Each structure stands twice: as C-alpha cells, then as structure tokens.
Image (spheres, rainbow, N blue to C red):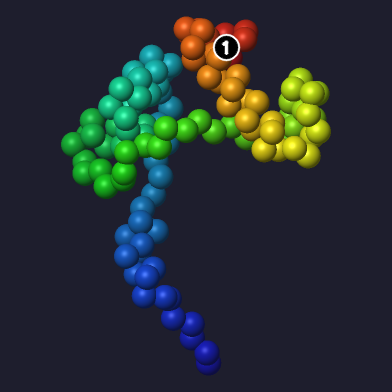
Amino acid sequence: MNVRRKPARWSGSDEAIRAVQVAFDVEQAVLEAVRTAAFHNRLSTSDQIRRLLDLPTTTKPVRPRLTVSLNAEDYLLLAARFGLDPEDRLGIKEQVAAELMRFASSGSKLGRGGPG
C-alpha cells in the first residue's frame, strides 16, 4: 500500500487545522462595537475578539484592503456604469477603487441607500 506523507512544511499547520471557527449571533450594537474596535486597533474582528478574551493573537496586522464578491452580472453592470468592456476586469477594479476613494474623501458616512 502506497501511503502518502505530508510535506514537512505542512507540519506546523496541524494545530490550525484542528481549530474550530465559532460564530456568535449578537445584537447589532455588539457587532458594531467589535468591528469599530478592530478597525481602530488595526486588527481583524477575530483578533479583536481574541484580545477581548485575553487569548494570544499570532496574525500580522490587517492589510489595508476592502473586498467585495462580484459575479458576471455585477461586472456587466459596472462595465456599463464606467463605459468599459465587461472583460476589462482590471479597468473595472481601478474605477471601483477610484469611486471608493471619492467616497472616503467626501466625508460620507453611509453609502447609497444607507445600511441594509
């Protein structure tokens, strides 16, 4: 029988593999407080919770980036909005980044339509 061995570089991840992600259903105020504290402390929300619980954190500081999931229809809508080819995903990404920068510089607190 041919038993495959795990590469040596993976041996340090054994403990992380056994870790279990725990989700908490909390009130909006709790969610906002944790996210705000994480933002101000430049931590992920997970690391902020670990800090609140006096648990060690081993992750690096959060990279200053935002993410959003876009599907094919979203790219079509954005391409039309920015006058670009839907296949020009880099161009669309650049236009979205520019719009986010305009949003930040305008001092806006809420996006279009507000929360929800």
Residue 88 as seen in the image, left or right of residue 33: right
Q: Identify the element where label 1 is drawn.
A: loop
Residue 86 as seen in the image, left or right of residue 30: right
Residue at 42% x, 32% y: name it: 64
Residue 1 higher or lower than 16, as above or below: below
Residue wearing tag 1: 111
- Crowding at label 1, few (<14), some or many (≥20) Cα neighbours within 10 Å? few
* Picture quarter with the C terminus: top right
**Among the 4 quarters of the image, the one containing residue 55:** top left
**Among the 4 quarters of the image, the one containing residue 78:** top right
Residue 46 as seen in the image, left or right of residue 58: right
Residue 65 appears anywhere in the view: yes
Residue at 21% x, 44% y: name it: 56
Residue 50 higher or lower than 107, as above or below: below
Residue 30 appears anywhere in the view: no
Toward the viewer: 32 or 74?
74
Q: Position of residue 65 (x, y in %)?
A: 47, 33
Residue 51 higher or lower than 21, as above or below: above
Residue at 79% x, 34% y: name it: 86
Q: Position of residue 7 (x, y in %)?
A: 42, 75
Q: Position of residue 4 (x, y in %)?
A: 49, 82
